Amino acid sequence: MPRHPWPSALNKAALCLVLSIWVLAPTCVAESIRAGCATPLWAAEVLENLSGARNLPTPELIDKNRAGITFLDEEKLLVYEVDVNTGRLSSRESPDVSSPYRLRARVFDIHSGKVIVSKEWGTRVHGSAIQVTSGGVLVQTGELLRLYSRDFVHLQELTLPHRDADDTDIISVSASGKTVLINRYNQKFSRFDVLDGDTLNLRQRWSEAPPLRRLYSISDTGIAAADFNQEHVLFTKFGTGAWQLVVGKPKLTCVGLPALVTDSSLVIGCKGLSLISTDGNFIYQDGFGKGEALRPEIAISQNDKTVAASLDVTRGTDFWDTGKGIRLVAMYVIAYDLSLKKRSLKVEVAPVPKNDYDFALSPEGSRLAILTDRRVTVCSVAAAQ
């Protein structure tokens, strides 16, 4: 992107703010993003003001109950957020009746910045997300799941059964988008429903104990999960209850999120990134330096050729393991070409986000989008060197 002779840094910042507000201009790309993107396609502030009740508390920076991004195709990006409409009262009967919480979504053309579609639903304080399946757009608003086409024609919906006070629902979509898994768990066991990604029709249902709670992903046929101590990766076929060891210590020093890329391969991130077959064979590994580690969040392209991971760079020591002596100094999103087994793009996320953070790959893996607080930036992965 060519540089312009700005009169001053202050004038540059002011002009960037005006352009972002009025035209969502792609020219106002942060310097750190420009350095990592060979071809920045678009960048703009798209979320509402973060102050006030919308800034819902969460222990994790990545909280897709609050805000997130996902691609509909190579040219369209969907951005969503949960806001509070203080003029309404919450209802326990329906997420669309007198609820103060609103799930708002907008679809942007990544070249022009034009808003193509805007949608809004009533929702709960928790349990909101938008994911893309092979059949279209899956919208979760509390206990209600709706499936839309990619141009938001209503196709199907289902209501999750009433849950007990100690029940929690997690809805996962496979990398291919063909499979949806609903995991309803409590302190004793998990109840699983496998749905078709095209129709939301039920394919399979079973229960297991102990419950499956976190750090797992699905393919179209099975589940990969980290054990309680994050030292081993386990894999099981749907409905069998037979978990097999994939890999663990000493081959891996730690395990983050085991992200299934296909039915027979997965990516593991922690102190490094590893591509491993489900029978435990290492296909590719990428290591990091001291003070560098991946967050437990991995994006996978629908064609299983590209993955992206978020890297934290920290400094300091903490003898008592309290975390107070360690400070976060930088964040990056790294994209990998799995066919070539190498990094294809590294983008610095600066400034470090304080409230909302997410990233996504387009279905073919040619675009990387990064949400950091109010701003979204779209990079071309294919053009990276």
Image: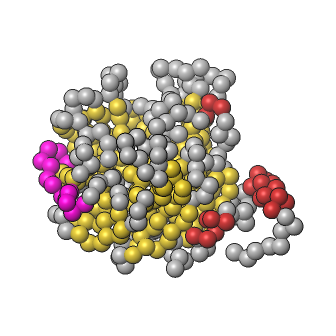
Q: Which residues are magenta?
A: 237-252
**Residue visible at 51% across and 50% down in the picture:** 327
Residue farthest along the right direction in this orientation:
7
Q: Nearer the viewer, residue 273 or 70?
A: 273
**Residue visible at 57% across and 70% down in the picture:** 36
Percent from the top left, x then y, of residue 379?
57, 67
Image vertical order of residue 192 relative to residue 328, above or below: above
Q: Nearer the viewer, residue 178 or 321?
A: 321
Left or right: residue 5 compared with residue 141: right
Majority secondary structure of magenta residues:
loop
The answer to whether residue 202 is seen in the rendering is no
**Residue visible at 61% across and 34% down in the picture:** 54
Q: Quadrant of residue 205?
A: top left
Image vertical order of residue 296 relative to residue 341, above or below: above
Image vertical order of residue 4 relative to residue 312, above or below: below
**Residue visible at 32% across and 62% down in the picture:** 267
Percent from the top left, x then y, of residue 150?
51, 54
Quadrant containing the N terminus is bottom right
Percent from the top left, x then y, of residue 90?
55, 21
The answer to whether residue 210 is seen in the rendering is yes
Image vertical order of residue 224 relative to residue 84, above or below: below
Q: Quadrant of residue 209?
A: top left
Residue 251 within the magenta-colored segment of the rendering: yes
Percent from the top left, x then y, of residue 151?
55, 53
Residue 61 within the magenta-colored segment of the rendering: no
Q: Coloring scheme of the render?
A: secondary structure
Q: Nearer the viewer, residue 230 or 292?
A: 292
Tag count? 0
